[in-house]
Amino acid sequence: MNRDQVLNALFGEGWKAEHLEADHFYGRASVLNQEVTVIGTSEKAEVGADMALTMARVVIQTIKERAGEPIVFLLDTQGQRLRRRDELMGLNGYMAHLAKAVELARQRGHVIVSVVYGEAVSGGYISTGMMADACYALADAEIKVMNLPAMARITKIPLEHLQELAKQSPVFSPGVENYLRMGHLDAVWEGDYSTQLAASISELQAKSRAEIAVDSRIARGVERGGRKAAGVVIERVLGHA
Amino acid sequence: MVNSFLEAGARDRVHGICDAGSFQEILKPSDRISSPHMALLEQPVAFDDGVVIGRATLGGAPVLVVAQEGEFLGGAIGEVHGAKITALIAKAIEEKPRAVLLIFESGGVRLHEANAGLIAVSEIMRAVCSARAQGVQFIGLIGGAAGCFGGTGLIARCCDVLIMSEEGRLAMSGPEVIETVYGVEEFDSRDRALVWRVSGGKHRYVMGDVQTLVADEVEAFRSAAMDALDTGKVNFDLQSLEAEHAMLTQRLAQFGDCRDAKEIWQRLGLPSAEELALMPADEFVSTTASARNVAKGAR
């Protein structure tokens, strides 16, 4: 799906753009008669320092001007911008700044939902969608760090071996189903996206702030069988006198 | 004898930085908690999965400590490695120590377990921010040979305060990755002076990404960490975030057209890059003090 298709599927007539560029956008939409802030990346955006700063500005503005308004991230990104100039500026600092803005919004009662509708890779996803209260992906979307041929080259593990192991382990190969099994995604969406978004926002709004503050992804990963080792570690460390 | 932070291993750093004899490791190598995924891929494992966690005191104050081991897979974050850090931060929220010390040395997400690593990084970032909001201070230390890259670079920039040596490197993508994608003209990863001017401690200090620049000595890191206990706490709130936003906005406006710290230093009226490169940390700090334009409490 492209940007306009996903905006249309989620909000229909209810979407008003404030800023629309080829690779990123923001605006407002209404979900169940409630205004929400929408922030997105498109066309497999490279997230650089400038884009991260822009998105952080929109989050801060929402915190200041529209207390408690839900924030929806719509993502299609190939990851962080790979340029010397962005590294010189301290790209990690810009991305962390955006992540902190999202975290502060959560702490101040903004419900945050993210939806991967295209591709979500590494740094471009961590500082935006992965900081949400509830993370979703469309069934035909892709979430990854690296594809298997590149991974085979770097780790020097034969590609055939990786492909074989990828059938039994969700831990390294691309795919939304793997991120579901590992507990990161709340669900993979199919069918009527707008109903599913509305349900997610209402569900989150019904929770207390203390409930929202709990990151339940490891527990969910254990439950779904994709991240058992992390569960053991958490138990043992917290049980340590 | 000077004890180099760069050359020390994770446990030596913990022992040298915390009060002598105070460190108690949680999940010791003898507990044999290693990565099941590395084993499945028939790769070597480490019985601490490349990260040491535990309790200690610093100048008598109770602290929790994390130290990544650069010798094992460049300190990269996998499922177990990440969960150890996340769990220790959860413990910090319960116990409210005076601070959590994060001694970074990591290239970021471990490719062999990339999905788990990526998720773990976001969990650690959330946990750090949440703990900060509940009053726990985070002190990050950077000076290992593997640097502090990728997801680990993001975690570092969530701390209250960062202490770094000139030898440390803090960035998102490493120069090799950028060179592979855009060529040697974009970033020559073998030009060590250039790599240093883009991601090294001195550049990051002038830019305001780190608060303290120290010499490559374990004792210097210890002393800076003790100072940070008293002065380095920053509230996790709108005011700090807006201060950081102003700093980052100004940085792009002032230096956004630069591609080398040489240009930035020249613009700031500092001595030549050659002179700055040779300066010991304390002299560098005093030389750059007035040029360094850092918003107070921007974190």
Image (spheres, rainbow, N blue to C red):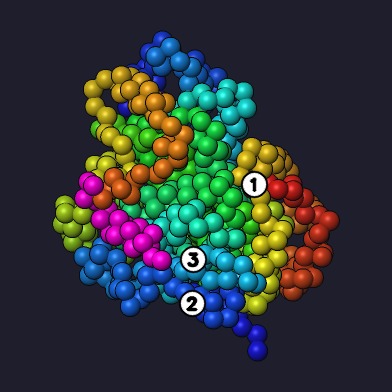
Q: CA distance from mark 2 to mark 3?
A: 10 Å
Give the chain letter at badge 2: B
Q: Position of residue A187 (x, y in %)?
A: 28, 34
Left or right: residue A4 versus residue B145 is left
Secondary structure at badge 2 equals: helix
State whether the magenta stretch is mostly helix, strand or loop.
Answer: helix
**Boundaries of the magenta span:** A223-241
Q: Quadrant of residue B57?
A: bottom right
Q: Which residue is mark 1?
A: B235
Q: Quadrant of the N terminus of chain B?
A: bottom right
Compare marks 2 and 3 and give the one earlier in the sequence: 2
Q: Residues within 10 Å of mark 1 (few under 14, many from 20)?
A: some
Label 3: which secondary element: strand
Is residue B132 among the parts visible in the rendering?
yes
Chain letter of disc 1 in the image:
B
Chain name for mark 3: B
First-in-chain label (2 vs 1): 2
Question: Pointer 3: what residue?
Answer: B66
